Amino acid sequence: MINVTRSSMPSYEEYCEQIKSIWDTVHLTNMGPIHNQLKEQLKDYLKVNNVELFVNGHLALYCGLKALKLQGEIITTPFTFASTTNAIIQAGCTPVYCDVKQDYTIDETKIEALITDKTSAILAVHVYGNICDVDAIQKIADKHGLKVIYDAAHAFGVEYNGRGITDYGDMSMLSFHATKVFHTIEGGALCFKDEGLQKQIAKQRNFGINGEELECFGSNAKMNEFQAAMGICNLRHIDDELQARKQAFVRYTERLSNVEGLTVLPLTDKIKQNYAYYPVLVDKEKFGLNRDELCEKLLAQGVLARKYFYPLVSENKEFEKDMSKTTPYAKMLSRNIMCLPLYAHLDTNDVDMICDVILK
Ligand SMILES: *Cc1c(COP(=O)(O)O)cnc(C)c1O
């Protein structure tokens, strides 16, 4: 069985060495020394000034929205993981769905028409490591006095114009879940522009506590030392990791980029890519099979492709009405796109086998 993803692991010995000091410090969680060390290393790697670590990406995003004290409507997209919309709703705001464009990110030309006097922010997603048009989005936000937040869960290590992608906007969330390019088992982070937000973010992460005071209502979303130790180990190998992903990515592209009816992600030098996912958009008319049929063919050969993202978050049953109608392109994508297996050291023979099944 070839799974759609496989977590990267440091060696057993390397991890044990990294956690050894915890038996001396007996500091297991609550912003311990390993947590602080990882934070500093990530600031360098991501090329950002302010980073705070979290127990997972979802709570990072939720705490970020709360720290920004957002209210009313937030313009976002439905072509994302459930987390993005859940964080908006949990923070007491209303998601307003904007359609996505051909690169799967928010269609910036459709944002302004959705702005009302209740709009407080734009929460866009760098889908599959493809980046949003961050310059156009910032222009719109500046014109209308809106905050800009990015769900950068897919975009670890991506750079644009020589700048870390999480340095754009007011705030970006990263996920360090086991399935992501870089992981801390579970984990996440917020990168943010305004240093003054640090206190607010820290309070949201720790029950609203500041010193001895309870200053607001907050969550418990702290990253523990064992998670941070996994992060330090994985960060040591991140360049090899990205290089190994690139090999599989390039091989897929060689085999699949000219297949009638399939659209794959382009290799590009416009950004520093992270090769996080290998999505394939299937056009049944031209390809002969639809997405679901192709997934079944692959599964029969022991290949687990993932219908990702499907369904749209706007199709959540708790919404009173089906909001997916207002975003036809996102809906079409969710019905016709899938991600092929991609992880570091995925064997080229396996990539070829998967491509053979698809081409056949
Ligand atoms: C993984 C992911 C999240 C949530 O991150 P967790 O660390 O699993 O909580 C949010 N948004 C997107 C787009 C993701 O892929």
Image (cartoon, grey):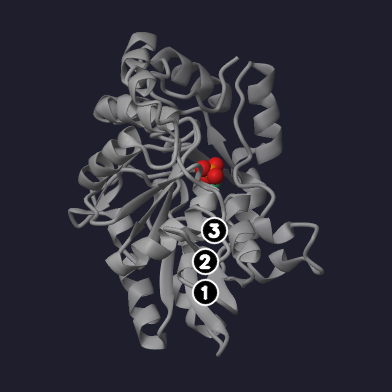
Q: Is residue 313 above or below residue 35?
A: below
- In the rendered structure, which amino acid carries the disc numbered 1? Leu
User: Is 272 on the left-hand or right-hand side of 327?
Assistant: left
In the displayed orientation, state which residue is furthest to the front: 212
Amino acid residing under circle 3 = Tyr
Task: Estimate the spatial distance between the alpha carbons at disc 1 and disc 2, rounded to whole Å.
Answer: 6 Å
Q: CA distance from mark 3 to mark 2?
A: 6 Å
| Pointer 3 residue | 62
Q: Secondary structure at mark 1?
A: loop
For marks 1 and 3, the one nearer the N-term is 3
Report the residue marked by disc 2.
66
Give x and y (percent) for residue 132: 39, 61
- Confirm or deny contact between disc 3 and disc 2 (CB under 8 A): yes
**Considering only vertical position in the picture, is 276 above or below 208?**
above
Q: Which mark is residue 50?
A: none
Number of the label disc, if any, that sits on residue 70 = 1
From the top left corner, tell me how far across and down residue 264 is, in percent.
45, 42
Relative to 2, does residue 289 appear above or below in the rendering? below
Secondary structure, mark 3, is helix
